[in-house]
Amino acid sequence: MAEARETVSTSEAARQQPKPPYGHLSVVCGPMFAGKTTETLKRILWAKNGRGQEIRVYKPAFDQRYARLQIVSHEGLAADAEAVHDWDDRTVAIIEAGVAVVFFDEVQFFETPNFNGDILLIIEDLLSAGVDVVCSGLDMDWQGKPFPIIAHMAAKADEVHKLRGVCTVCGRPSTKTYKKTGSGGQIEIGGSELYESRCTIHWAVPDLELTPDLFHGR
Ligand SMILES: [Zn+2]
């Protein structure tokens, strides 16, 4: 009986513990060349230098376009980042270190075979512990298919910042990533030699001539 009473009182004590407020989830998404990395870096610099918050920045380990342990914008802004392939006990370490904001860059690539772990669960755990999370990445592949991770995160987010680029054909706002070769798998790492940002019309029909009527109402 004494043991049972102790169990009850322990769970009551646990219930009386003040829970940290649920973390704030932000998603920064859009096509390539829309300024996602610049927007993320602005948020990183504001959290770190403006608010003096403890932060962590993670990116998929396979991404080596610019620098292994930095995320770099096309304008040259940069922040230190940890390239991760496994998560291990990072969630505990983050909570114990009093980290206020965790950033995931190129979050759509945090899946097998690039990453061992369930990124959706990891983000849920961080939010539940009161840590704010900012996810940035591509919302769709070059074929217009949503990336499941970012689609899920955007649905759950408190704030979604969907950025648009500039169509390389007509100069109007773009929401799609166009692949110049028009072939290959969903994921092929590349820059402007391989991809362009395009409006829906010039993404769907690349050689369509521009006429004023074509864009009526868009
Ligand atoms: Zn266009």
Image (cartoon, grey):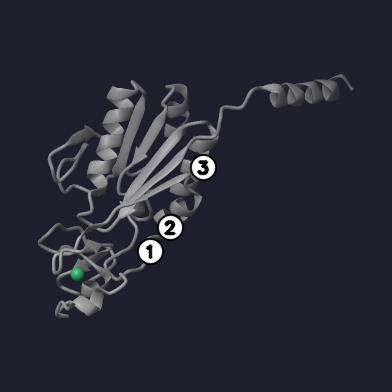
Describe residue 75's horizontal placement relative to residue 174 as left or right.
left
Determine whether the beta carbon of the residue marked 1 sits less than 8 angstroms from the nearest atom of ligand 1.
no
Question: Where's the C terminus, which quadrant?
Answer: bottom left
Describe residue 182's horizontal placement relative to residue 5 as left or right.
left
Q: Nearer the viewer, residue 201 or 55?
A: 201
Residue 112: give x, y in percent of width and height: 37, 55
Which residue is identified by label 3?
Answer: 124
Q: Can you tell which mark lies on residue 146?
A: 1
Residue 114 visible at all: no
Disc 3 vs disc 2: which is toward the camera? 2
Q: Type of residue at label 1?
A: Pro
Dot 3 or dot 1, earlier in sequence = 3
The quarter of the displayed image where residue 211 is located: bottom left
Disc 3 vs disc 1: which is toward the camera? 1
Question: Image point 29% across, 66% down: which residue?
Answer: 186
The picture quadrant for ligand 1 comes to: bottom left
Dot 2 or dot 1, earlier in sequence = 1
Residue 155: give x, y in percent of width and height: 48, 54
Residue 36: give x, y in percent of width and height: 26, 48
Q: Type of residue at label 3?
A: Glu
Q: Residue furthest right?
A: 1
Q: Type of residue at label 2?
A: Ala
Question: Image point 42% across, 22% down: which residue?
Answer: 97
Residue 192 visible at all: yes
Q: Determine the secondary structure under disc 3.
A: helix
Contact (Cβ within 8 Å) of mark 2 with mark 1? yes
Question: Where's the N terminus, which quadrant?
Answer: top right
Q: Can you tell which mark lies on residue 194?
A: none
Q: Determine the secondary structure under disc 2.
A: helix
Which residue is identified by label 2?
Answer: 151
